[in-house]
Image (cartoon, helix red, strand yellow):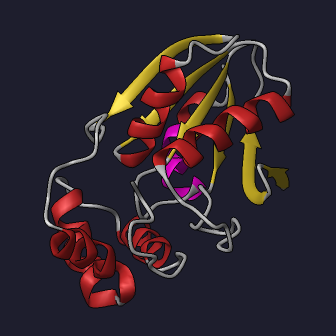
Amino acid sequence: MYYQVNGVNLHVEQQGAGGTALVFLHFYGGSARTWGKVIEGLKQDYTCIAYDHRGWGDSDKTAATYTIKDLADDAQALIQELGLKRYVLVGHSMGGKAAQLLASRRPAGLEGLVLVAPSTPTPQDMPEEMRASMVHFYDNREGAEIALNNIALLPLEEHVREMALEDMQKKRPFVPGGLA
């Protein structure tokens, strides 16, 4: 299903039922599919909502900007669009950074914040060449495999590994300064 928020169409997957919703924000290179196994174990007790951030997966890749603020704004707008009254943000890496920013706004209905290996809440200090190099890891399968080997600390089932590699390469084109 797709929802338009902040001028972009976000691909959203919703499963389960429960009074409290879990809103999943994926890592840089992930998608809603990243959370599949987690959602499988939680959907009996919670409404589970996972979506592809702008520029990733099956969401729009035509936005003018892709900042952490944009990602937090999208999450907040999606939560409002879905009419969630009680929810917990669950963010991994870059998704954790966006979740922290959104939580800092103290939005109505937010009951908790779960961070899974979150990126630091402020921009990491690094040379622009290094940042660009990291972004371009996902331009081809070889680079995506190098990145995944550094991200996944435990062995992944082969179909999960293939899904992650596919998602890592399903991104918007690189825009310098696009993820401030």
Which residue occupies 27% across, 38% down?
Answer: 117
Asked if residue 128 is among those painted magenta in the image, a careful observer would answer no
Which residue occupies 75% across, 17% down?
Answer: 18
Dividing the image into 4 quarters, which one contains the N terminus? bottom right
Residue interval drawn in magenta: 32-38
Q: Nearer the viewer, residue 40 or 179?
A: 179
Dividing the image into 4 quarters, which one contains the C terminus? bottom left
| Picture layout, residue 152 above or below residue 140 | above
| Location of residue 106 (image quadrant) | top right
Q: Is residue 110 left or right of residue 6?
A: left
Q: Is residue 79 left or right of residue 90?
A: right
| Location of residue 59 (image quadrant) | bottom right
Q: Nearer the viewer, residue 93 or 107?
A: 107
| Location of residue 174 (image quadrant) | bottom left
Which residue occupies 23% across, 68% down?
Answer: 131
Which residue occupies 43% across, 27% down?
Answer: 100
Q: Give the percent coordinates (x, y) of residue 156.
A: 29, 61
Q: How many numbered marks appear?
A: 0
| Picture layout, residue 54 above or below residue 5 | below
Q: Report the magenta stretch's main SS.
A: helix
Q: Is residue 6 left or right of residue 40?
A: right
Q: Nearer the viewer, residue 21 or 111?
A: 111
Q: Give the percent coordinates (x, y) of residue 127.
A: 14, 66
| Picture layout, residue 138 above or below residue 56 | below
Asked if residue 34 is among those painted magenta in the image, a careful observer would answer yes
Q: Give the percent coordinates (x, y) of residue 44.
A: 68, 25
Q: Give the percent coordinates (x, y) of residue 177.
A: 39, 66
